[in-house]
Image (tube, rainbow, N blue to C red):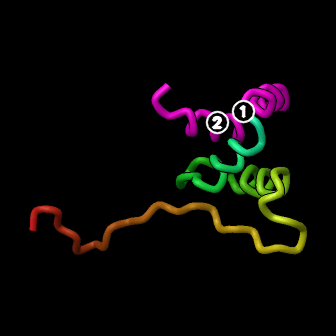
């Protein structure tokens, strides 16, 4: 596997209960925290993003939820050839 973190993020985002249970037992919570905190734009839906932050204790009740990662766009006048 070239990108295990991407596969883990996909299972975290769209896996069913059984998929997630296998993943948790296979890699552990710390790996899931690392994948979550280093997520790229588009890896998580807002629902999964919130769930996993609470589930893994990254965010506690009453704390502010980190924003979903966003793609960074280049300025409209960017020209890579100059």
Please tell me whether residue 19 is drawn above or below residue 77 in the rendered image: above
Tell me where residue 37 appears, x and y as whole percent: 64, 56
| Residue 22 appears left or right of 1 | right
* Corner quadrant of residue 5: top right
Q: Report the magenta residues as a range.
A: 1-27
Q: Is residue 13 magenta?
A: yes
Q: Residue at x 69, y 34 (%)?
A: 11
Residue found farthest to the right: 61
The residue that appears at 82% across and 73% down in the rendered structure is: 63
Residue depicted at 90% across the width and 68% down the height:
61
Q: Is residue 80 magenta?
A: no
Q: Which residue is mark 1?
A: 27
Local secondary structure at mark 2: helix
CB-based contact (under 8 Å), mark 2 and mark 1:
yes
Residue topped by disc 2? 8
**Could you say which quadrant of the image residue 74 lies in?**
bottom left
Give whichever of 29, 68 is nearer the camera. Answer: 29
Q: Residues within 10 Å of mark 2 (few under 14, many from 20)?
A: many
Q: Position of residue 22 (x, y in %)?
A: 79, 25
Circle 1: element type: helix
On the rendered image, what quadrant is the C terminus found in?
Answer: bottom left
Distance (Cα) linking label 2 and label 1: 9 Å
Q: Residue at x 64, y 36 (%)?
A: 8
**Left or right: where does residue 82 sit relative to residue 32?**
left
Main SS class of the magenta portion in the image: helix
Q: How many marks?
A: 2
Q: Is 77 placed left or right of 63 in the picture?
A: left
User: Percent position (x, y) of residue 10?
Assistant: 63, 37
């Amino acid at each position: 596997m070239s990108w295990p973190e991407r596969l883990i993020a996909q299972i975290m985002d769209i896996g069913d209960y059984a998929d997630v249970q296998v993943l948790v037992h296979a890699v552990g919570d710390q790996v899931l925290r690392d994948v979550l905190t280093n997520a790229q734009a588009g890896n998580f839906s807002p629902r999964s993003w919130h769930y996993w932050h609470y589930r893994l204790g990254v965010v506690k009740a009453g704390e502010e939820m980190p924003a979903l990662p966003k793609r960074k766009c280049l300025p409209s006048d960017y020209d890579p050839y100059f």
